[in-house]
Every structure is written in C-alpha cells, then in structure tokens.
Image (cartoon, rainbow, N blue to C red):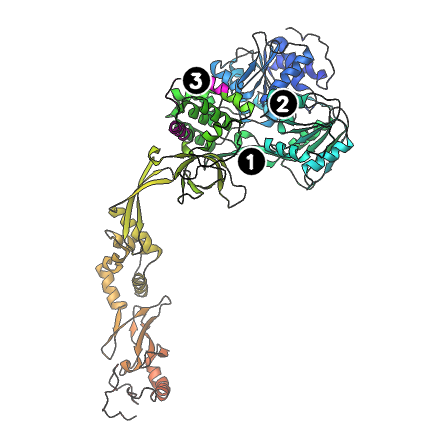
Amino acid sequence: RPSPKAQPMPWPLPIDPFLPEILDAVRSRRAVVVTAAPGAGKTTRVPPVLAEDGPVLLLQPRRVAARAIARRIAVEREWTLGREVGWHVRFERRFSDDTRVLVATEGILTARLQDDPLAAAFRTIVIDEFHERSLFADVGLALARQAWLARDDLRLVVMSATLDANRVAAYLGGCPIVTAPGRSFPLEVSYRPGVSIAAAIADVVARTRGAVLCFLPGAPEIRRATSDLAGRLPSNVPVLPLHGGLDADAQDAALEPGAGTRVILATNLAETTLTVPDVVAVVDTGLHKVARYDAERGIDSLETERISQDSADQRAGRAGRTAAGVVVRLWDARDRLRAHREAEIARVDLAAAVLDVMAWGGDARTLDWFEAPTAHAIDAAHDLLARLGAIDAGRLTALGARLQRLPIHPRLGRLLLEAGAGGMAARACAILSERHFAPARHGTTDCDLLAAAERGDLPPHVLRVAADLGRQAAEAGAPHTDERFRRAVLAAYPDRVARRREANGDRLLLASGAGARLGRDSGVTTHEFLVAVDVAGATRPGDEALVRMATGIEKSWLRPNRSEIRHRIDDDGRVGAERVTAYDAIELNVESVAPDPLEASRLIEAAVLANPDEAALRLIRRLTFARQPVDLPALVHRAAQGARSVDEVRLEHVLDASTRRALDRDAPVALTLPSGRECRLDYRDTGHVVASAKLQELFGLAASPRLGPGRVPVTFELLSPAGRPVQVTSDLESFWRTGYPEVKKELRARYPRHPWPDDPWSARPTARPIPRNTPKPRA
C-alpha cells in the first residue's frame, strides 16, 4: 500500500497529527467517522491524504463552499485548480481526468450514482459537514453505503464538527471513530437582546481590529443590514455580503483576508465549511432560514426560525480560531435553544429525493436510510410525482427519467419541459430555484411568474442558472405563448390550484381544502381560478397562508378528479341531492339529481335520532311507562325506510300489534273525562302521567284513575274556567274533600256563571258556563 507523500504544509493545523490514524482506519476497515472541532482543518487536510490511494469525491452541502474549499486545497497542496483538485456543482464544473480530489455538492453524488451505482470513478467518498443533515446528504450516504456494501474496495468517510458519531459508526458497520481537537482561543460572549444589528456591529467595530462576521437569516436581511450600517461605520471599513445568491467574485471578495477591519454579513453558509479568515468578532442574530413542507396543504416555504445550540456554538467558534475573540448574541441569555438542528429529511418535500432513489433503482420505502423519513412523507412525495407524470403505478415513466436528470425540483422540470424550454421558462425556473422573489407589481397580469421572468433587472446568478437550464433542456416545440406558459405552471403545480371565495376578493380556497390569502404584490387580480406558485405558511395561529406569486388559469383547463352525489336535508325536512364534480377540494360544477332512496333513509334516520320531534318523544315515554322494551335506533331505522322527509317518519306505524295493544291498554293517548271530552295524557320522564282539565269537567269523578302496570295515579292539573292552573293533585278524592271548598270560596265570585256545587261527587260535569237567564244554582 502506498504511503502518503511527505509534503510540507504551509502551516500546521490541529488535524495534522491524526491524518495517519485516519488513513490507517480507512485502509483497514474501509470506513471511518471523523469528528473535529471547527478550525481543526479536516475539510482541506483529510481528502488530499486519502487521495494518495485513489480519486476522492468530497461532498459539501453548499455550492459556494465547494468552490472555496477546492481553491483552499489547491493553495495548501500547491496543486493546480481544475487539474489535481476541482469542483462540480449544479450548473458549474471545473475538473479533469487528472483530478484527484473532486469537491462536489451532495446532489452531484446522487446524480453520478444513477449512471454508476458502484461509484467506480472514485476510491473514497467523503461526506463532510454531515451534522447539517441536508436531505441529499442523507440520500447520498444511503446510496453510497449500498455501493460500499457491494464493492469491497470503496471507502466511506463521514466528517463533522458536531455529530452523533456512534450512530453513524454503527450505520457503517461499527467502523472506527477518530476524534481530533480544534484550535480555539478564549471567547468573550455577551448577550444583548433588543439591540439592533447595526448598533451591535458598530459597537464591535469600535473595539476590535479584524474581520467582524455577522450571521443573518438570509439575503433580504443582509441587504437591510447593509443599508442600516450606512454612515455608522468609519469610511475605511468595507461591508461585504456573503450568501449563496452572489456570484463567485462577490463571494470570493468576502473570503479574501484583509489588512484592516471589515464587516462580513453572512448567512449560515459561513457557519462551518466556509472559513472567513482573520475573524475576531461574531455578531449573531440567532436566526436562520429553514425549509419546511406541509404535505397536507401542499405548501413548502422558507421560514425564519431560531438556531440550535450546536449551531450557536459553531458560529461563536468562528471568532476564536486564530486569537481571542468577541461574540455578541442578540438574544436573552435565559433563552434555551434546541440542542441539535433538525434533519431536513424530517421537514422538507421528498419528491426529488424519492425520484432520485427510483431512478437509481430503489424504493424509498425500503431503502436502508440512516434516519428513515416517515411513511406519510414518502406517500406524499409519490402522490406529487404521480400528478407530475413522473411515475405511474409506482414505476418511473419516460418523463420521470427526464425530470430526474434535470438539476432542479421535478415541479420546475415539468414547467420547463411543458413550456417548451424557452428563455422565459428557463428564467422562471431559475427564479423559483434560486428563490429570487422580488415583488414589484405594476398593474395587473395573468401570471406573476411570467411578469417576473420578463423583468430586465434579474441578478446575474439567476440569469446564469437560466442560461444553464436552457442549454440542458433545450428542445424544439411550439412557440412560446402566455397561455402555454400558464398551462405549464398548472402542470408543475397541479396540487396548488386555488379558487377565489368571492369575485375579485383576496381570500382563496386551495385545492388541499385549506384557506389562503392572495398577497397585495400579486397582479393576478381578476381570475376566479389560479395556481398558487409561491405560498408562505401562516406566521401566527389562526392566520391563513399567504400566496405571494400566482398564475391565473381557466376553469376549462381543470380536469375534474372527483365526482360525488351529495345528499342533504333542507330546512323543510325533505331530502335533496346534487351531483358535485370537483378538482380536489375545489367544486367545479353542481347539478340537482334525484335522491338515492337508501341514502335518503339514512339521512332521515340520522336526523330523527339526533333531534327527535315531540311525537317521537311522547311515544318513547309511553313505551317506557307501559314497560315495553324500546330499541329506538331500530325503531327509527324501520320507520325511515322509504321516507322522503322527516315529517313522513311515524314511529307508531312500525310497532308490532302486541306492542300497540299494550300501549292502548297501559299507556293510552287520552283519558275520557266525566264531561265526555278526550283529554290528552302527558307522560313525563319522571314516570308520572299528567292530564290538564277544567275543574268543572271532573265533577263526579271520585278518585284519580290509575294507569299502567305500575298502577300510577293520573296527576291532574286542575284549571279555572279561564284555563289558569288552580291546583295539582294525584289524589282527587282528597282534593274534593279538603281542597275544593277553599278553591270554591276563592273563585266563585270571580266566575259566577260557572257551577260551584257543594257536592262535587254528584254534580253534573261540564266545561261550559251556565246560560244567561238560568237561575244560579244555590250553593
């Protein structure tokens, strides 16, 4: 086995003494996990040593880092950039057949493994900064491990500054772990909640000399901070941005060491692999942008969230690499951060990853992942790919194979191909791929995306990506038209169709069934139907998602994918029905149809059980009083058969003959009074039975009748001639004897034309007053 060539390094780094151990571990076990603190030098020192045994593929999570690392290795090893060391990132490559260390983004490995599943072009694959847990790092590691298991001379190295090394080592067959210290100097850490970014930077610049690195969530925040710093710093202190949207020259300017003080405003790409030299101070907002996907609503968004504790520690470590440093954290020291960052595989759209695994020949459901995604997330990815036409019956289609080869999300690939791969389509896909949303509405438009693509002020990196996309997907096709472009947007976002809730209003119903609101910057103001191209999730509970970019479409373009007969009970209790054709949750057409008898019976049955009318309640109480077993659901079910309205349900009609006889005998509907009138009986839940009658109608009735198996006496509500309650009694005999004399004395003068006999037992019952000209009966 050849030994690494003894080549003097321009300067020593903490990782250097551990290089022989790492090389021995790789040679003996074909895998090793390397953990090293920030600043140890693992990224630039380990791969060249491994390259002594054959070509090395070094994977990085970001394009800007890949280019910078390749340049750094070239300087340290005195190699020629593009020959011994090179890079390969999306839309850009610089390497040759002589390249010994190829620095690439993680997606490049996945793309290479489609054509070369055993990674035959490389002896060693190094996955760096694995702690960032990007989606394609997980995909790359899973596929590379399969090649490692199948090929006995392939070697795997996983490196990170903060990593659960034992879990990764176990995933790689229990391989060795090499831990190297970093080189750190004392840090003065202070917390300044509520202080503005510009004020914190100005304060640090005034008391330090060297590079001041400020971490912000994204490019818009960097632009605002740059503006806020105007006039607050000495004129000789440059302010340099550093983010993935810059071209290579602008990124290099931030990474070049300087003689004096300078301020670098960076996103989290400067957190680990990208080394900004001579940093003496870090100002940390404690925020970063996190991609999240809501599969239920089909919404993917970039949210600003708090960083984790390991991220905060790494950011602080940037200030202690060469000398004692200063760290200013713009949050409260009492705040508790999450210990580790969340893996992308648990929070982002998996459609591109699932498509890659299928093109490789595997199944995301059964692939041996380092950390498997949820079955729900994989199912959502399969659903989206099927709607895009990339898969059919779980198999990759010809279109899916084409989409997988494009270096953009399958959605954007479908848009690019559907629109004819023209200049506007490529520019639109570049805008979405690079997340360059610059809302600047000028009047109305049919398509915000097309209006953005037609702008003349797109940044150079977006135009460069558009040019590369146009070259990769160029094909002959029908000439570009606005309608074709809008149809292509629909093809790319079939799950994002929306409909206005009111004409020309801003409230929308999404195809997922969720609500959303059209942003003020959108120029799509008149279309009833539209596609929500860019949707931001709600920032506060109860708020709706915000559609920032939309495309108007025609109703006729939507092919219904759902049809149902919907039954309902109208206010009058009758069952109605309508046929609804819909696109997901959005109704397209509704027409009245005849109700299905079985469904009508089911609805009526449910309505009666949920809210039985008074007749049903009276019957139930009578059955209970008569001690007849009652199965109400079964009774209602029988009565509802064939009914077309709630009013047609008559429970008593479905009672069997013996039950009806028992009811008539033990719980009659009415009681015949001595006056001859039929008085309805009211059966109460308490088990009592009540009859309301005028006192004079009961003359001659000596005692309260008794009903039912329990021989329950009827309780009489005795009424005055005017129908007002006088007394309540279930012992009529006692009332005549003791209560009636008092009632007579009180009411006789008030109702002189009604009989008030001294002997109610023998008096003639009546409900009528004594006719005029008739002598009043003597008391």
Earlier along the polypeptide chain: callout 1 or callout 2? 2
Q: Nearer the viewer, residue 539 or 313?
A: 539
**Disc 2, SS:** helix
Mark number displayed over residue 581: none
Q: Is residue 451 on the magenta stretch?
A: no
**Disc 3, SS:** loop
Earlier along the polypeptide chain: callout 1 or callout 3? 1
Q: Is residue 415 above or below residue 747?
A: above
Region rendered in magenta? 467-491
Earlier along the polypeptide chain: callout 3 or callout 2? 2
Tell whether label 2 touches label 1 (CB within 8 Å).
no
Task: Select label 1 or label 2 by which is in front.
Answer: 2
Q: Which residue is mark 3?
A: 474
Please state if 45 lies on the left or on the right of 711 as rendered: right
Mark number displayed over residue 250: 2
Check the image and name the residue furthest to the top. 2
Q: Is residue 474 on the magenta stretch?
A: yes
